[in-house]
Image: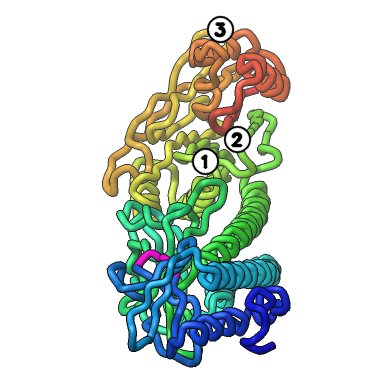
Amino acid sequence: MTVNAQPWSLLETASDRDWESGTALGRVLDLWCDSLGVRAAAVFVEGRDGWELVQGSRAARFEPVLAGGADLLQLPGRFRLAVDSEQPLRQPPDAPIALLLSAAARLHRLHERLKEQEFAENYKVVTLEAVYDVGLAVASTLDLEQLCEEILLRAVSLLDARRGAFYLADGGSYTLRGTIGGEARPSLPHDDPGMQSLEPGAGTERCGLDLLPGARFPLTVAIAYKGQTKGLLAVADKESRTGVGPFSEADRRALELFATQAAIALENANLHRQALEKERLEREMQLAAEIQRGILPTTMPSTSALEIVGWNRPTRQVGGDYYGSISLDGGALGVVVADVTGKGMPAALLVSTLHSALHLLLEKREPNADLLATLNQHIAESSSSNKFITLILVDVDPLADALGYLNAGHNPGLVIRSDGSVDQLPASGLPLGLLRTASYQYRRVPFVPGDLVCLYSDGITECTSPADEEFGEGRLIEFLRERRTEPLSNIVQELDEAVTRYAAGQPQGDDQTVVLLRRT
């Protein structure tokens, strides 16, 4: 092709490569210069900051951007022409050569845009493939610490970033969990004003979070799952052949896509950790239940002069109620019912402490006020300040028609006499562990053949109906009075059924324990 060819044939015979490389537009510019005797010329198009260079001729050097008031020749459309000529030129915009030049410029720009669009589409495909690959790698990790490291490393690699930091939501702030390439801000409150810059459409240049001190080109995205921000992913300073530069909107979209996958991976890791924690707690509860079953008696010792039956139903696998019997000197028998504040594992641990301490103390001394004072001090020193124990302890001598008792803030024991009258065994001191120093009283009451003693926890009397009315002490007394001559095992079974019927499907609010004693 030569400049002597028909001018319009230049447009027809130029290949796509000629248009993409600028060769075709350059030849038309050369033709224009030759036709007017101009040393060099360049085509400009209107842009944001002025007139932007499209193509120059004959290796001429023109500024890439010219001010809006520059002296340029007008071409059809949005194009202008800068001329390097000794003589000022004025050519009408509709001159054939001007029309040819404008058409060539438009074709050149069209090919540029097609090329950019093709590049953008290819870049998008490559980016999506990369995001998909790194997403798979991240999703395969369930360990939270390893996952945090993997997310940060993959994000920095995905965007060719020089620096990066990863934050996880922790209470009322985001806490730094890892950094690459330099220091990072250690934490960020949830209500930081810069969080608004992470909203969709904010743009890469509007990030208001200074998470990477000294970074020139920061980019931060939120890691959100179901509308809740779980963390922050910050990168900075995109690597290039000439140094570092800003991130594009395509980079931001890629990082947001990766953040979505990271959020799912974090949620999976969190669910996995919760499952492991639940499994661990279940194993501990099973072990505690086995230990407690070893502490609570399967049967109570009965003699020819004394019948004893005990029953317990915890609200959970393990409970805070305790009952049992202890052999005393001289053939006497001690029977105890206790109630630890709270439920579950903490209460079960304190039950174990009470069981051990009570047995050790009763091996060395008789039931009396000093024994309970010593036990109180031990419980206060070995438990937290918000834990205490109510306890009632009775001791029965088969050869005596009386029983002694100690009551540390527990429900009054009930003595149902053979004639139907009722006496109580009220509290004679504070619950164990409430104060380090406390005094107690040891009392004795008659206990003759035909008398029935009931020791119980408040889970019985405080059982509520659907109308939120408690079973109460009055119903318990009437229940026992009516059945005072029945076998003790029958009484316990019927009490269980009565309380269950009274609750009418309501969830059990507290551990339930009953111990019955009768002189035969």
Mark 1 closeness class: few <14, some 14–19, many ≥20 residues within 10 Å: many
Q: Inspect this view and state whether residue 88 appears.
A: yes
**What label sits on residue 343 in the rendered view?**
1
Please tell me whether the stretch drawn in magenta is mainly helix, strand or loop.
loop
- For image coordinates 57% across by 71% down, the residue present is 100
Cβ–Cβ under 8 Å for marks 1 and 2: yes
- Describe the element under mark 2 as helix, strand or loop: loop
Rendered position, 87 above or below 329: below
Describe the colour scheme in one phrase. rainbow
N-terminal label among 1 and 2: 2
Q: Secondary structure at mark 3?
A: loop
Q: Quadrant of residue 103?
A: bottom right
Which is more toward the observer, 437 or 197?
197
The amino acid beneath tag 1 is Lys
**Circle on res. 419:** 3
- Quarter of the image with the C terminus is top right
Residue at 67% over, 51% down: 286
The number of numbered badges drawn on the structure is: 3
Q: Mark 3–mark 1 contact, CB under 8 Å?
A: no
Q: Amino acid at mark 2?
A: Thr
* 489 left or right, relative to 35: right
Q: Mark 3 or mark 2, which has the lower sequence index? A: 2
Q: Describe residue 147's horizontal placement relative to residue 462 as left or right.
A: right
Give the magenta part as a residue range: 45-49
Q: CA distance from mark 3 to mark 1?
A: 38 Å
- Of the numbered discs 3 and 1, the one sitting upstream in the chain is 1
Residue, disc 2 = 315
